[in-house]
Image: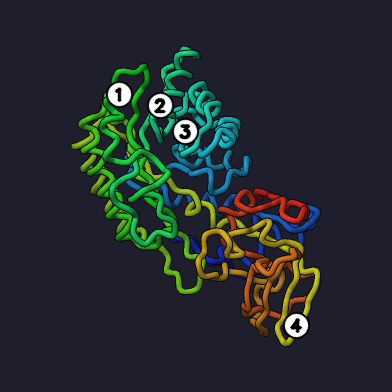
Amino acid sequence: MNAPNPPLVPGTVSTNPFPVENGELVVGGLPLSRLAARLGSTPFFAYDRDLISAHVRALRSVLPADIDLHYAMKANPMPALVQTMVGLVDGLDLASAGEMKVALDAGADPEELSFAGPGKRPAELWQAVAAGVTINLESPRELEAIVAAGNALGVKPRVAVRVNPDFELKASGMKMAGGPKQFGVDAEQVPELLASMGRLPIEFRGFHVYSGSQNLKAEAICEAQVKTLDLAVRLAESAPGPVRMLNLGGGFGVPYFPGDRPLELLPILENLRIIAADAHKRLPEAKLVIELGRYLVAHGGIYVMRIVDRKVSRGQVFLVTDGGLNHHLAASGNFGQVIRKNYPVLIGNRADTPPEEEASIVGPLCTPLDILGDRVKLPRAEVGDFACVLLSGAYGYTSSPLQFLSHPHPLEALV
């Protein structure tokens, strides 16, 4: 067996963290062909429990002790994975009542759950109030529904305010704050909302500020975190009670594409230590939280397809597989990319064979958008081989149009 890739430096990711045995990737201790036989069919997503657990523990070990780590379930809500994450992180951040059910079924403490999203339905708000989770308030309409639910249920709802700040997370792949946004309450409107909350039967918890995601610039993340604390301190002057929770957001990016440089974690850790010390003086009762999703799980997942045809069209090689953008929209470039770039791909049963040709990995769908690897250098692959997309532990299965063209859904396994 070849030596596995070097251990993950705390808080970093490796493009291919899986070891290789007799030319095959080893996922969850199983060679790829044996894993495929165990699952019974392709395509599938497989998540390596040990890789993900080691990565989260490594990150947790270097975070300041007074910074809580939350997992954003939207990145990957697979129930078995969520159950594993419950034992590794301090809390979970939810984006729907469906995610809340998965979290509670996995044994999560309701007091360590927070629920965000700009369009929470009245029924979802009632469920959240009944469960005792913290609701990140995003409009006055939500506040009315929350109070009504609390009165009807005889429960004092736990409420934080999601703030749309007057700044953005620079260099983010997806900006979620600053300027007009559907997320949260504009910072300048928050004092008025806080004043109204003081007269209501609710438990005020604090603030949630999520400025952006998929950021590979440490200095941008540090700047946003500092500004978030300053904003929370200003808003606290209008709060109906002490700030007991401040979610600083996340935004830690993953280097998916050629030329991407991994996020430098050390400056962020030092910045968090300074922020924690500052917050202890300025918001003495506040628990600080960072909220991460893809950064915790992306590297530990792989999407595996079987090659069903090898075609040459006017000199270009096409490896046609049994899976495609309907299963992994992000890898096809149709999930937020402006200019399409390739995720890291390889032939999973020829993982130690040098590249011999340029080929495109495509799916079975009747659309030219169904490309998971465009003109990439690969070893020669044949029908029956496994084409794999790395960094697939986040925003894969549940972020894709699974019903498109009515092909079978992929399997998922935590191994």
Q: Quarter of the image holding residue 84?
A: top right
Asked if the residue at tag 2 contacts the one at tag 3, i.e. Cβ–Cβ closer than 8 Å, the answer is no
Q: Counting other residues with Cα less than 10 Å from the Cα at mark 2, is it few (<14), some (14-19), or many (20 or more)?
A: many
Secondary element under disc 4, as helix, strand or loop, is strand
Q: Which residue is mark 4?
A: 313
Q: Nearer the viewer, mark 3 or mark 2?
A: 2
Secondary element under disc 2, as helix, strand or loop, is helix
Upstream in the sequence, badge 4 or badge 2?
Answer: 2
Q: Which residue is mark 3?
A: 113
Going by the numbered disc 1, the residue's amino acid type is Ser
Q: CA distance from mark 3 to mark 4?
A: 52 Å
Q: Which residue is mark 2?
A: 143
Secondary element under disc 3, as helix, strand or loop, is strand
Going by the numbered disc 4, the residue's amino acid type is Ser
Q: Quarter of the image holding residue 36?
A: bottom right
Location of residue 262 with respect to 79 vertically, above or below: below
Give residue 196's mark: 1
Q: Nearer the viewer, mark 3 or mark 4?
A: 4
Left/right of residue 108 with respect to residue 345 in the rendered view:
left
Location of residue 63 with respect to 244 vertically, above or below: below
Asked if the residue at tag 2 contacts the one at tag 1, i.e. Cβ–Cβ closer than 8 Å, the answer is yes
Q: CA distance from mark 4 to mark 2?
A: 59 Å
| Residue at image point 60% right, 51% down | 399
